[in-house]
Amino acid sequence: MTAVRTFWRGIEWAIAALMAAMMILVFVNVVLRYGFASGLRPGIELSRLGFVWIVMLGASLCLKEGEHLAVGELFDRLPRPVRLALGRLLWLVILIAALMLLVGCWRQTLANWHNISPLTGLPSGLFYLAGVVSGALMSVTATLGLLRPGYSEAPGVEAHVAGAPDVDNAAQGHDEETRP
């Protein structure tokens, strides 16, 4: 397993660990609240912080896997040269948006780092730091998608394998198979 795969696998495990910790924390808090009229005061804030990190890391992972919501019906019917150009344009737009996320969250992290939560004692900037990490991961992913030689598909649209029949040919073959 390469270092890159190990890195992304680590992110998957971090998301799973955060999810498990959140569920346990919320469950214990509910039991304490309704069963014993008490609760973990920092529990709500910690679960909210965990949720923000799960969402931001998950968004980065989804971009890398091409799992974001995409409607590829129109894109798949375009000629290959148009798909090439449009795919690169889409990666450029994603790169710009990811850099905006990175810079904006970095500024918010710095602005809120000294605001300490009275419940947890943690800096409020940790919420925005998730956006910095996610923005950096998405920027790297988008840059690789933009610069990868021969990479022609839009993010989220199923990639065509070299040598595989084109979508138009596959559709024609499918029509011929289903005709009586």
Image (cartoon, grey):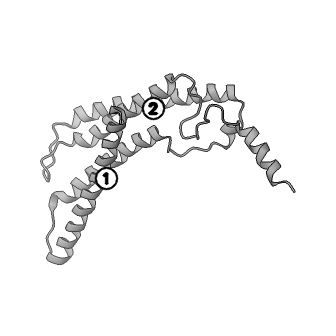
At x 23%, y 39%, the residue is: 125
Question: Which x, y percent locates residue 71?
Answer: 61, 44
Q: Which residue is mark 1?
A: 16
- The image quarter in which residue 83 lies: top right
Question: Which x, y percent locates residue 3?
Answer: 32, 32
Q: Nearer the viewer, residue 70 or 129?
A: 70
- The image quarter in which residue 165 lies: top right
Q: Is residue 25 left or right of residue 146?
A: left
At x 40%, y 42%, the residue is: 61
Q: Earlier in the sequence, mark 1 or mark 2?
A: 1
Measure the C-alpha gap from mark 1 to mark 2: 26 Å
At x 70%, y 36%, the residue is: 166
Which tag is nearer the camera, tag 1 or tag 2? 1
Q: Is residue 18 left or right of residue 163?
A: left
Q: Which residue is mark 2?
A: 97
- The image quarter in which residue 128 lies: top left
Type of residue at label 2? Ala
Q: Nearer the viewer, residue 79 or 59?
A: 79
Q: Nearer the viewer, residue 6 or 136?
A: 6
Q: Is residue 8 left or right of residue 95?
A: left
At x 19%, y 59%, the residue is: 43
